[in-house]
Image (cartoon, rainbow, N blue to C red):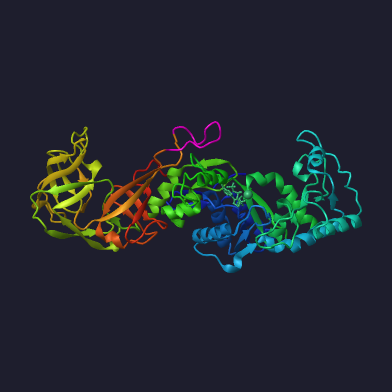
């Protein structure tokens, strides 16, 4: 029953999109009339930040609603008062808006607004003889539940009369009983091979304040009871969830059937998105944040949606990545390199290509007139003419990248070394004549001469050079901070140590003092650029100021991923 969405070229060379298994189910439900309008939902529990895995669910659900002309709901699954925080509600809203492009206010729902309905539903079950108040304590409950091999035993309270159950449940609500002393259970089947069906608890007593409902309730519904009701109340047609809920589906179906909803929603499970060698678990990310290893939930090395946004990923790149990963029932793991491929592809034609010296070293052109600055015409994006040109200052003193000069180069090194000639991108040919070092032997200055005949765009054809390097004019350059990121995990060793701690990569963040073209002085938070020969970079939205620009490396230009 698995078929991921596949894009293939047919014999005529057109792209054909084969439908995924969920679309096939929906097509059938529309055809046989069991469903008239497609309504999907994304139901996060507001107990943490969303991550790339959630993006899969958001994109899948909102995409189906759009495709079938239906509705997509963002529903906060906030029925558990213990863990939820308004801070997370706000961040989730922002993340979903960002991924979807927009989100209609009317399409935002809160499960906690249905507490009254859920209570009424519980009463209805009691009246049908399908639920009972049980006084077993937690330990006894475990004993009675049985195991995977052995059936459970009926609770001694199972045959309470409807009247007694109604009375006790009402008193549970009124606060007459201690936390944990009594629960309401569905009356299903203690001998079911599916443990979820062995008279599951559907309401418990818990004196906790709720972020939305305040102190109105001291009883709260359990997830497996609440969720199908939330879906049914909102008219959700297809309730998509991840595979671990497969065993809960019979209970989901039982709840919507016994409550006699006119249009019962249908639960469909799909495989979670996993990223190879990347930490996605909420628990681990929380620990990295609490231990101060990362700078909050939106640290650009994480794959929370807030972090990806801050790093400079676009919603389009994430959508393409999810599409390439496919929707299926088969568990699999996607490669981070594929996500990197998607952002490169998205930015390639859209973003200006600028020059930067990330690890700068001075280059002096000894035969260039002192204090002269000339302005060269440079294409903003040579692959996209519509992006126009800009003027880039050039002078006697430049900065180049340290790795573009070597005193003793290995074979096949075509960049600068004593005696070698290279092209300064968009400018002239220069030949290295000399260099200076400090007492430790570090290169502090490279000296060159230039050939005025070789100006870029002048049609010079006298000779060719093998290397081209980027540069920025020292007099006009803007000094900035550049943050180079790598995986937070040491991939050689695997993600986790035996004791469950994370194998950290000590080089996951390198901070550089760099020089960029003066045109970048105007860059605003979230603006992104290609730095030629280096990668794509985005102005940090948290730490960057006009005086002190901070650029995050989104991705380098080198790719280890090959699209099929
Ligand atoms: P985590 O596993 O990180 O704790 P969660 O499942 O507890 O996440 P919820 O807020 O319950 O987080 O999830 C909201 C929705 O997102 C659910 O429908 C869930 O199935 C889906 N979801 C969570 N993780 C993934 C994933 N890795 N891939 C696809 N969907 C996911
Ligand atoms: Mg969950």
| Residue 401 lies in the magenta stretch | no
Q: Is residue 163 visible?
A: yes
Residue 388 is situated, as x and y percent measured from the top left of the image, at 26, 63
Total marks placed: 0
Instruction: Pick the residue in front: 233 or 34.
Output: 233
Point 43% across, 51% down: residue: 12
* Image: 193 above or below 519: above
Residue 150 is situated, as x and y percent measured from the top left of the image, at 80, 34
Instruction: Pick the residue in front: 286 or 130.
Output: 286
Instruction: Classify the position of the C terminus by image quarter.
Output: top left
Point 77% across, 33% down: residue: 149
Lateral position of residue 187 relative to residue 561, left or right? right
Instruction: Classify the position of the N terminus by image quarter.
Output: top right
Residue 120 is situated, as x and y percent measured from the top left of the image, at 79, 62
Q: Which quadrant holds residue 71?
A: bottom right
| Residue 501 lies in the magenta stretch | yes
Lateral position of residue 448 relative to residue 116, left or right? left
Lateral position of residue 14 relative to residue 514, left or right? right
Main secondary-structure element of the magenta-colored stretch: loop
* Image: 543 above or below 278: below
Over which residues does the magenta segment extend? 492-505
Name the residue furthest top. Answer: 498
Q: Is residue 313 visible?
A: no
Lateral position of residue 50 relative to residue 371, left or right? right
Instruction: Pick the residue in front: 512 or 451.
Output: 512
Point 30% across, 54% down: residue: 480
Residue 340 is situated, as x and y percent measured from the top left of the image, at 41, 47
* Image: 448 above or below 150: below
Q: Which quadrant holds residue 284?
A: top right
Point 82% across, 53% down: residue: 177
Name the residue furthest front. Answer: 439
């Amino acid at each position: 029953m698995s078929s991921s969405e596949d894009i293939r070229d047919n014999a005529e060379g057109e792209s054909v999109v084969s439908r995924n298994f969920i679309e096939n189910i929906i097509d059938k439900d529309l055809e046989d009339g069991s469903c008239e309008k497609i309504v999907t939902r994304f139901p996060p529990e507001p107990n943490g930040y969303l991550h790339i895995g959630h993006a899969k669910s958001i994109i899948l659900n909102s995409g189906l609603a759009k495709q079938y002309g239906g509705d997509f709901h963002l529903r906060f699954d906030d029925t558990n008062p213990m863990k939820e925080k308004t801070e997370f509600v706000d961040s989730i809203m922002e993340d979903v808006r960002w991924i979807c492009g927009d989100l209609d206010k009317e399409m935002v729902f809160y499960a906690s607004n249905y507490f009254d309905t859920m209570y009424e539903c519980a009463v209805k079950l009691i009246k049908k003889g399908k639920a009972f108040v049980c006084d077993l304590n937690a330990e006894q409950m475990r004993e009675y539940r049985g195991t995977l091999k052995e059936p459970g035993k009926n609770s001694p309270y199972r045959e309470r009369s409807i009247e007694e159950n109604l009375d006790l449940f009402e008193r549970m609500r009124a606060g007459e009983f201690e936390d944990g002393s009594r629960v309401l259970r569905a009356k299903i089947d203690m001998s079911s091979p599916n443990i979820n069906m062995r008279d599951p608890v559907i309401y418990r007593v818990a004196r906790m304040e709720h972020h939305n409902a305040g102190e109105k309730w001291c009883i709260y519904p359990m997830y497996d009871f609440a969720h199908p009701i939330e879906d049914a109340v909102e008219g959700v047609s297809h309730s998509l969830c991840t595979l671990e809920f497969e065993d809960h589906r019979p209970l989901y179906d039982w709840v919507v059937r016994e409550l006699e909803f006119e249009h019962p929603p249908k639960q469909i499970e799909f495989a979670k998105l996993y990223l190879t060698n990347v930490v996605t678990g909420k628990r681990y990310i929380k620990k990295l944040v609490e231990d101060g290893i990362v700078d909050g939930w939106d640290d650009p090395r994480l794959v929370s949606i807030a972090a990806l946004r801050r790093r400079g990923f676009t919603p389009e790149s994430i959508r393409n990545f999810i599409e390439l990963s496919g929707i299926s029932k088969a568990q699999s793991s996607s490669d981070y390199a594929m996500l990197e491929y998607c952002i490169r592809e998205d930015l390639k034609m859209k973003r200006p290509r600028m020059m930067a010296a990330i690890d700068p070293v001075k280059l002096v052109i000894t035969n260039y007139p002192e204090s002269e600055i000339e302005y060269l015409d440079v294409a903003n994006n040579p692959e996209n003419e519509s992006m126009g040109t800009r003027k880039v200052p050039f002078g006697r003193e430049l900065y180049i990248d340290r790795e573009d000069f070597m005193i003793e180069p290995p074979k096949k090194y075509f960049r600068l070394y004593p005696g070698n000639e290279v092209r300064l991108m968009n400018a002239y040919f220069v030949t290295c004549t000399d260099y200076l070092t400090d007492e430790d032997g570090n290169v502090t200055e490279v000296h060159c001469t230039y050939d005025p005949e070789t100006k870029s765009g002048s049609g010079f054809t006298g000779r060719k050079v093998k290397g081209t390097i980027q540069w920025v004019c020292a007099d006009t350059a803007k000094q900035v901070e550049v943050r180079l990121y790598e995986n937070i995990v040491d991939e050689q060793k695997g993600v986790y140590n035996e004791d469950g701690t994370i194998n950290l990569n000590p080089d996951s963040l390198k901070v550089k003092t760099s020089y960029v073209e003066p045109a970048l002085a105007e860059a605003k938070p979230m603006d992104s650029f290609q730095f030629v020969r280096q990668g794509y970079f985005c102005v940090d939205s948290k730490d960057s100021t006009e005086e002190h620009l901070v650029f995050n490396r989104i991705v380098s230009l080198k790719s280890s991923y090959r699209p099929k």
